[in-house]
């Protein structure tokens, strides 16, 4: 495992509860984190709440994926990707109902190579990942006796770039007995 240089937080946990609950801004504050500062898997979570008034959850995850095995597929299936997620949910509790607002962002990007089969031969292809998704949501919960009614509206924005390209010099393919060649490849 390759860890970045510098200071890091392996595991962190903090919980704060006021001496006089219900009189301050919050009844409970919780912060947890792991792997911050250079680990390939990092996360942090914040929870702030006041009973019967509000609750706020904020979550962050970051994962680095690296794959390169020279003995697999001639070493041509490789990737070096980064996945990040940020998720926030704010709930208000006026009476017995619950009103909430949420936002989430998911990102996945990084270079990758793979092979594409064409005319009984395999060709090296550059296949970078570049995706971002934003989700926003708002809703309300109503208790109805033994039942509950939930009304929610959401919005999603997706940006993605999935262009595969033929790197220069890889148009001859992997099979020396096959005369197939590619001069360009775009998907």
Image: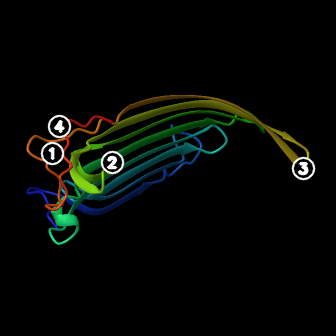
Q: Residue at x 30, y 57 (%)?
A: 120
51 relative position to 106: left or right: right
Query: Residue shown at 36%/52% (left/top)?
Result: 44
Q: CA distance from mark 3 to mark 4?
A: 67 Å
Q: Are marks 1 and 4 in contact (CB under 8 Å)?
A: yes
Name the residue furthest right.
145
Element at badge 4?
loop
Which of the two discs, 1 and 2, labels the residue nearer the N terminus? 2
Q: Nearer the viewer, mark 3 or mark 1?
A: 1
CB-based contact (under 8 Å), mark 2 and mark 4 = no
Q: How is the image coloured?
A: rainbow
Give whichever of 119, 170 is nearer the camera.
119
Q: Quadrant of residue 106?
A: top left
In the picture, the disc for residue 129 is none
The residue carrying mark 1 is: 171
Mark nearest the camera among 2 and 4 is: 4
Marks 3 and 1 sit apart, C-alpha to C-alpha, by 66 Å
Secondary element at tag 2 = strand
**Whole-percent x, y for residue 91 in the image:** 61, 37
Of the 4 image quadrants, the one containing the N terminus is: bottom left
Residue, disc 3: 146
Kindly indicate the quadrant of the structure image that contains residue 92. Answer: top right
Q: Secondary structure at mark 3?
A: loop
Which numbered mark, 1 or 2, is in the foreground of this view?
A: 1
Residue that label 2 marks: 83
Q: How many angstroms separate mark 2 from mark 4 (CA)?
A: 33 Å
Alpha carbon of mark 1 to alpha carbon of mark 2: how far? 31 Å
Name which of mark 3 and mark 4 comes first in the sequence.
3
**Quadrant location of the C terminus in the rendered image:** top left
Mark 4: give few (<14), some (14-19) or many (20+) Cα within 10 Å. Answer: few
* For marks 3 and 2 on the same chain, the one whose residue lies earlier in the sequence: 2
Q: In this figure, which residue is indicated by the disc labeled 4?
A: 183
């Amino acid at each position: 495992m390759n860890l970045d240089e510098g200071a890091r937080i392996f595991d962190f946990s903090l919980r704060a509860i006021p001496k006089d609950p219900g009189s301050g801004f919050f009844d409970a504050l919780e912060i947890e984190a792991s792997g911050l500062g250079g680990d390939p898997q990092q996360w942090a979570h914040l929870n702030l709440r006041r009973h019967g008034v509000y609750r706020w959850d904020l979550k962050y995850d970051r994962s680095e994926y690296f794959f390169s095995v020279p003995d697999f597929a001639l070493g041509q299936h490789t990737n070096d990707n980064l996945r990040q997620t940020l998720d926030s949910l704010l709930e208000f509790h006026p009476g017995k109902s619950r009103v909430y607002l949420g936002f989430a962002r998911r990102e996945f990007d990084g270079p990758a190579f793979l092979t594409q089969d064409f005319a009984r031969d395999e060709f090296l292809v550059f296949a970078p990942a570049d995706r971002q998704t934003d989700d926003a949501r708002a809703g309300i919960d109503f208790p109805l006796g033994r039942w509950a009614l939930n009304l929610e509206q959401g919005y999603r924005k997706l940006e993605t770039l999935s262009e595969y390209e033929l790197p220069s010099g890889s148009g001859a393919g992997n099979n020396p007995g096959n005369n197939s060649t590619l001069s360009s490849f775009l998907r």
